[in-house]
Amino acid sequence: MDNYVGKRLDGRYEIQEIIGVGGMAVVYKAYDNVDDRIVAVKILKEEFLQSEDFRRRFKNESKAIAVLSHQNIVKVYDVSYGDRLQYIVMEYVEGITLKEYIEQQGRINWKEAVYFVTQILRSLQHAHDKGIVHRDIKPQNIILLQNGTIKVTDFGIARFSRSETRTMTDSTIGSVHYISPEQAKGDVTDNKADIYSVGVVLYEMLTGQLPFQAETSVSVALMQLQSEAKRPREINPSLPVGLEQITLKAMQKRPRDRYQSAAEMLLDIDEFKRNPSIKFDFGYFLDNEPTRFVGKTESPLGRTASMPRQSAQARTGTMPRAGTAPRTAPPLQRNGREDDEYYDDYEERSKTLPVLAGIIGGLIILAGIIILISYATGKFSKSEIEVPNFIGKNYYEEILNNDEYKDLNIVVSATITPGTYEAGVVYDQSPSARSKIKSTETITVFIPKDMPPVKVPDVYGLDYSEAVEIIEAAKLKCVPERVQEPGKENTVVRTKPERFQDYFEGQTVTLYIVDTGVMTEIPKIITWDLETAKEMLEQCYLVMNRTVKYENSVEDKDIVIGIEGFSEGATVPKGTEIQIIASNGIPPEATAKISIRLPNNGSVFKQGSLRVYLDNVLVPELSKTVLLNGASHPFDVTSSNGQKKLVVIIDHAQVYECKIDFNYSPARVSDEKPTPDSYFSTTTTVVTGREPMIDVVGMNYEVACDKLKEVGFSYIEPEYVETKDRSKNMIVKEQDPTPKAFTKYPLDTRITLTVYLFEPDNPDD
């Protein structure tokens, strides 16, 4: 295997390192010095360059992914088909394979599994719409990005369904654990083969196990053909029944019993997401084919193989069985002479035999008469039929006036608008397909109700935004799909359905828009309102997710505060869906952990009244009676919206003060003023000197303290009295001792200031 690390391809792609090795190619991480970006380069191994078959497959892969443009499919930027070197340049994605994630988790939470499989199905529906079947869907070919986005890769054995529909099993590259039964047999395959593989991937995510495991690939292929997988709920009982049903329907052996498209499977998943307790009426658990002997069968390699007779081991279940033996052996047959001797002997021993024979003969004749009469009256005629599968068929074109169904009692129920399902197409039926009913019973098929058709407007050549207005004015919905075709950027080149065709109100029209490039930058939308952000994204050919995530923020409601999974200025493919995070207008809450030291009154039984104020507003849930025993007293303070001052008071004396910034989580505490040491010690520091007392009545408490400290007085204690007058809040009402003219006080005098504290009747005031 050649190593291209350090080389430059076509003077453009500088190979940096190997990031993957496959069956026929090596994938490298490279730098594109023309477009200034990191890419992945997949190079066909040299030993396969001489093989026309492998070169064809490699070219098929590039043809397959070149026509695909979907957010869940790895994009292709460039291809090269040289004689000495063939390579594909693709989008470089950083993540792990879904297989690695399953191995890490053991099994995946069912909600997360549904999220992943939804993205896989959307990518496949896009590919199937382009006429491409992947044929190698497995967790190893699915990349999981850090933000939860799925990227499907490796279309190495993909085929254009209109040209090649057979994948012979002796040349299949896909993993045998995930291939469909028809692939294992070498039969014709279509998009339903991918559906089966998706079912196996979903099964593995939900259970942490593969449905079929054996020592050899041939044994696994045989199990795919003949064995039924253990039901997921037998392995993981916590799974919802509806999700198990969806998984097993996707894994049905016969393609006609599976979902007929990725879109159909998505419809059931959407129903399940809306109601996780739902139970579907699929009817695929019925065993409509009796067990039979198999003499010869088609091997998984496409050759006819003779099956050996079953041994005792096989009958006990220790070996795979081709068929099931009858429960009892047929009775032994006697020859004629032995029978004569037996009956002669019996006649000699019994004289009543002729009488019994006559009675038995009469009974047989009577039974025969009854049976003939029953058949004549139709009593034993076939009274039960198997209900056909009508889902997906157009009622008017395929069912009505169809001789195949002329003996069935079919009624139509039209109850929903055709915007949900295609007009005239059966989306449900009752009883379900393959059910057994009497031929006289009614079969109800459900189709969208008839509505007056509307013409798809002609928006060819118009700018996308203008086309949207016209489409919506016609009471139709629209979705964009970007295509790299000649034309002016962002103009509509065609629609699906095409212009002037009849359609129904509420149905979705696909607008194909010219995209001259594949990458764009996410604009700076943070701090803008949602409407402006959407316009800015659309100008950069990006799509804003219809569901906005809201979070608490100090910003006004509907202001963008973040982007999930990306950052502003990041380079992303055009058409990428951007998940916006917006403010709900509610400031975020944060909690600060506070611990104060309680005063020690000298008695373990002395109690005090503790009150906590936040910005001078009492916090009732933190106010309580405490023991004044010198112990620590911890508590949490939760609030929001900026910086606030916290004060703790015990029996009218302030013992703690700090500032808390609730814009951070956890909230940040600063400027702490803890309980003075004088509360905890019986010793007193001697302060010498005497000074006149200043009158601070009427001043703000903090200003008053500063004035007294300037003189030299340091022992200042507040006592609080309630007031309903907000204007008096934190104003000094009284001081003790009261200043006296011509009198000097010792500087260690304890000064008590009585301070008004505003406490409204309504805490919201």
Image: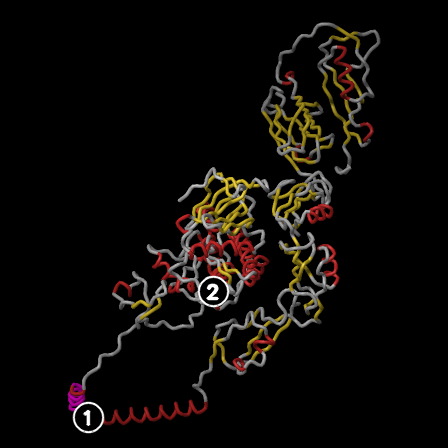
Residues in magenta? Answer: 338-349
Q: What is the three-letter code of the residue carrying label 2?
A: Thr
Residue 377, picture quadrant: bottom left
Q: Nearer the viewer, residue 509 or 647?
A: 509
Q: Position of residue 677 (x, y in %)?
A: 63, 17
| Residue sitting at x 62%, y 54% | 484
Judge whether 705 appears above or below 367 on screen.
Answer: above
Judge whether 613 appears above or below 424 on screen.
Answer: above
Q: Residues within 10 Å of mark 2 (few under 14, many from 20)?
A: some
Q: Nearer the viewer, residue 362 or 88?
A: 88
Q: Position of residue 684 (x, y in %)?
A: 65, 11
**Image check: 189 left or right of 227?**
right
Characterize the magenta stretch by its predominant secondary structure: helix
Judge whether 535 appears above or below 443 on screen.
Answer: above
Judge whether 748 appears above or below 550 on screen.
Answer: above
Q: Which marked residue is nearer to the observer: mark 2 or mark 1?
A: 2
Q: Nearer the viewer, residue 57 or 382?
A: 57
Q: Position of residue 661 (x, y in %)?
A: 68, 30
Q: What is the three-letter code of the residue carrying label 1?
A: Lys
Q: Where is mark 1, residue-wise?
A: 351
Res 237 visible: no
Q: Where is mark 2, residue-wise?
A: 165
**Image check: 338 left or right of 236?**
left
Q: Position of residue 685 (x, y in %)?
A: 65, 10
Instruction: Give the numbered dot on residue 92.
Output: none
Position of the N terminus, as image quadrant, is top left
Q: Callout 2: helix, strand or loop?
A: loop
Q: Is residue 309 magenta?
A: no
Res 629 visible: yes
Q: Callout 1: helix, strand or loop?
A: loop
**Image check: 150 left or right of 528?**
left
